[in-house]
Image (cartoon, rainbow, N blue to C red):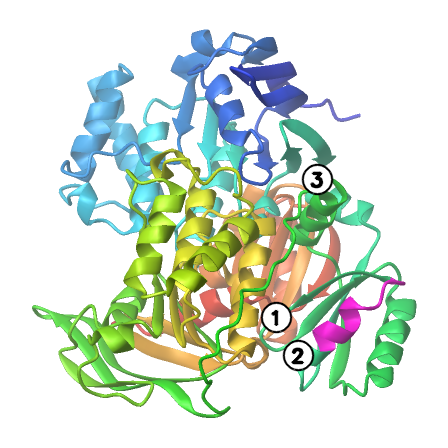
Amino acid sequence: MIEPSPVDVRVRGLTKHYGEIEAVRGIDFEVHHGEIFGLIGPDGAGKTTTFNVLAGILDATAGDVTLLGQRPRDARTNVGYLTQQFSLFDDLSIDENLKYIAGLRDVPAGAFAERSQRYLALMDLAGIGDRIAGQLSGGMKQKLALCCALISEPRVLLLDEPTVGVDPLSRREFWSVLARLASNDVTIVVATPYLDEAERCHRVALLYDGTIRDLGTPVELEAQLECRRLEIRAPDIAATERTLENVHEGIVDVQSYGDRVDALVHDAQDGERVVRAALAAGAVSVTSIDTEAPTLENVFVARLRELGSSTPYTPLPMTTRPRAKDGALAIDAHGLTKQFGTFHAVDNLTLKVGYGEIYGLLGANGAGKTTTIRMLCGLLAPTAGTIALAGQTSNLRAASLRRRIGYMSQKFTLYDDLSIIENLRFYAGIYGLESSERDTRIAWVLETTGLRGREGLRTAKLPGGWKQRVAFGAAVMHDPEMLFLDEPTSGVDPLARRQFWRLIDERARAGTAILVTTHYLEEAEHCNRLCFMSTGRMVTEGSPTEIKAAQPGRLFELTIDAPELAAAALDKFLPAWRVALFGTRLHLIAIDEGDLDRATGALRAAGVTVSQTRPLPFSLEDAFIGTIERQPAA
């Protein structure tokens, strides 16, 4: 019989009050030695409060909390904590940030030299120690912050949303590092709004309204849902979604994406029969229906809806402005190039976006996405190339044209010293809304973001997810013809993210041309077409289905007993993009028929037991990482 691992983190009846607000309401959980334990939940669920108590920053109002058998304040020398806001000094170099933290944590000089070299190499930051932290990309900053948290070699690591704003390549590398740390006896508690990341945890707890509602492995939670997911491809996505939303028997949930509609059903065969019958009755044609397993995001959304967390959907009050005809181009850029000195941030990029289309720009940090959007918005002059917006090729900074554009930047476009309502009134004035429309549109923003009654709050005091909701509302309330969204849902929980995309879909169906960037590949499925960018250039373009279908080989999931040992064995002969760890599961891309046999043979030789092997469809994240990693070095 295998002995259970010792408990490194024990929480019993944890309660925390802020005045009359009960942020955490008597939660219980344990984290075992060497485990990656995930806390997931919507904005305001109590995750950050829980982390602050575990880190010894806040005292609990009630309950018993121990880390490594000690009270949190007494255990702090053995605990590393990475907060939502980077605790780096932007004007210091990588080495200087590490030395400063090492000094605070009393790390001996000899130990510091060895550890900094080891952790910088682990994070792929070796050799650039003199680079200023403020000049690093988001992914590199996050890796440096993790190095700082590890420099004292803590036995417990607390990570509060560590990869928000980090690109998919860096996120996968980050989680590979976490898997290695866990296999080396570091216990990790992590909060994340990205549920594809939560799939990589050994166990997860769903926190809602200060209470843990579900706890288990990702596989256990997905099985508890007792549903299957139907991927329905049809020529008319909007009609398919409208028809299925009116079917109340046999269908649990319906969500549209760029080139498909997902229906969550209790039984795959009965569900497909119900779907086909409903669509036939509505004279809606179907191209194909595929059955897939539910995702952890399906579990999260379904559970929170049971708890009454979903904000009612309120359509944007429509304008009387005439819309362009289908097929017309709203955005037409040819040979777009931007140089900063000798550096090509964008290099000969050509893209066309029609009215009513959602077009996604995807790429790693520094690929040129934000620079592209800033040029298209008229905020940055291109070095070369041509731009046409709504057929206009000159005077792209004219006030009359800008009123037809909505823009939500990567950095919040709100004024922190103003309240929510003051920010919205300011933007209503900037966009030239008539007084008769202004109050109606502002009321709509407050209603659809779930912030009615909180409009007097200063935006500086809002959680990141709430700020994003207000910024999005400000960008769309004038009902623009062209909408530029630069990472609009960064740090937003899945329910709010779904609300965002329903609004985005509605804008597109009303004829708005939408250009969006995102680091969350699951939501990129909402786009009609995608462009993958690397080093300022377009690498590939197509619908999500087309891009996934173009991937070489097949994807397999292997259930294993020694994840880190397995990854080390496969790293010896497979490139990194073909192997990814997901808790006790490993994803492997086999290019030919012999790859799977060679991989399982290598695992057996390394002493790894493979208890199950099953094929999986490619995700958009698999397609993105494989496509970018296969590009030749610049």
Residue 613's image quarter? bottom right
Task: Classify residue 347 as left or right of residue 533.
Answer: left
Q: Which mark is residue 257?
A: 1
Residue at x-position 34% and y-position 72%? 405
**Can residue 583 be seen from the camera position used here?**
yes
> Magenta span covers which residues?
240-250
Residue 580 within the magenta-colored segment of the rendering: no
Mark 2–mark 1 Cα distance, whole angstroms, equals 8 Å
Q: Amino acid at mark 3?
A: Thr
Position in image of residue 111 (x %, y %)? 27, 22
Find numbered disc 2 in the image and state the secondary structure of the residue it sits on. Answer: helix
Residue 238: name its quadrant: bottom right
**Could you tell which of marks 2 and 1 lies nearer the N-terminus?**
2
The residue positioned 51% from the left and 15% from the top of the image is: 19
Which circle's residue, 1 or 3, is located before the other in the chain?
Answer: 3
- Name the outermost residue toward the left: 341
Residue named by callout 3: 217
Report the residue marked by disc 2.
237
- State which mark lies toward you, 1 or 3: 1
Identify the residue at horizontal 23%, vertical 30% (top origin): 98
| Dot 1 crowding, Cα within 10 Å, few <14, some 14–19, many 20+ | many
Which one is in front in this view, the residue at disc 2 or the one at disc 3?
A: 2
Is there a contact, CB below 8 Å, between mark 1 and mark 3? Answer: no
Whether tag 2 and tag 1 are in contact, CB under 8 A, the answer is yes
Provide residue 521's location: percent of width, then percent of height: 51, 62
Q: Amino acid at mark 2?
A: Ile
Position in image of residue 186 (x %, y %): 50, 28
- Element carrying mark 3: loop
As helix, strand or loop, the secondary structure at mark 1 comes to: loop
Instruction: Give me the C-alpha separation between circle 1 and circle 3.
Output: 27 Å
Q: CA distance from mark 2 to mark 3?
A: 34 Å
